[in-house]
Image (spheres, rainbow, N blue to C red):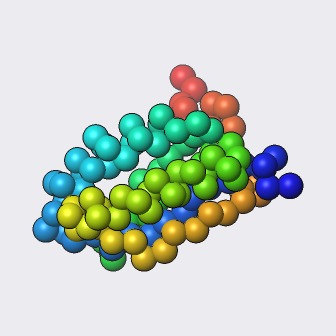
C-alpha cells in the first residue's frame, strides 16, 4: 500500500561550476526552507560528487502522496534552477525499504 510506507525523492543534477554561488543561494535560501515547510517532510540531503561535479539529492517523506506533491513542486521550478545553472538528469520517487543509523554513542570517544 503506497500511503503506508516512507518514500523518497532521489535526483541527480548537472551543475554549472561557474554559477556555484547562485546554486548555494538556491539550496540554502529557497530549496531547504521549501522542503522543510512541506507536509510529511522527514529529512533532506543535498550532496555533490567532487569528481564529476554532479549534484545529488535524497528527500525523505512520510508517504507517497507527500513526496509526489514535493516532486511536482520541484518539477515546476526547473526554470529557476536553469537560471542557477542546474539541470535535472534524473528524478525518481522511490520507496524506502530499510534505514541504518549509527548506534547511540558511536563515533564518540570514551575518556
| Residue at figure coordinates x 67%, y 50% from the top left | 65
Vertical placement of residue 62 versus 111, above or below: below
In the image, 38: left or right of 14? right
Q: Is residue 50 visible?
A: no
Residue 25: tell me if it is visible: yes
Between 52 and 109, which is closer to the camera in this rendering?
52
Q: Is residue 97 above or below residue 4?
A: below
Above or below for 37 versus 16: above
Residue 98, given in percent of the width and then of the height, sits at 75, 54
Which residue is at a point 18% across and 55% down the rendered structure image? 22
Q: Quadrant of residue 88?
A: bottom left
Residue at image coords 46%, 53%: 73
Place of residue 28 in the rendered image (x, y in percent of width and height, measured from the top left)? 30, 43
Q: Position of residue 108 (x, y in %)?
A: 55, 32
Q: Residue 43: horizontal and vertical position, in percent? A: 55, 42
Left or right, 38 with reference to 101: left
* Quadrant assignment for the N terminus: bottom right
Q: Is residue 68 above or below residue 53?
A: above
For the point 39% across and 37% down, which residue is it?
33
Amino acid at each position: 500500500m503506497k500511503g503506508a510506507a516512507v518514500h523518497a525523492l532521489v535526483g541527480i543534477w548537472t551543475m554549472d561550476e561557474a554559477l556555484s554561488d547562485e546554486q548555494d543561494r538556491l539550496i540554502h535560501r529557497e530549496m531547504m526552507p521549501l522542503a522543510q515547510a512541506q507536509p510529511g517532510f522527514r529529512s533532506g540531503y543535498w550532496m555533490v560528487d567532487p569528481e564529476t561535479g554532479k549534484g545529488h539529492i535524497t528527500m525523505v517523506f512520510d508517504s507517497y502522496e507527500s513526496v509526489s506533491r514535493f516532486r511536482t513542486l520541484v518539477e515546476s521550478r526547473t526554470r529557476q534552477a536553469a537560471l542557477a545553472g542546474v539541470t535535472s538528469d534524473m528524478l525518481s520517487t522511490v520507496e524506502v525499504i530499510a534505514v541504518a543509523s549509527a548506534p547511540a554513542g558511536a563515533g564518540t570517544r570514551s575518556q
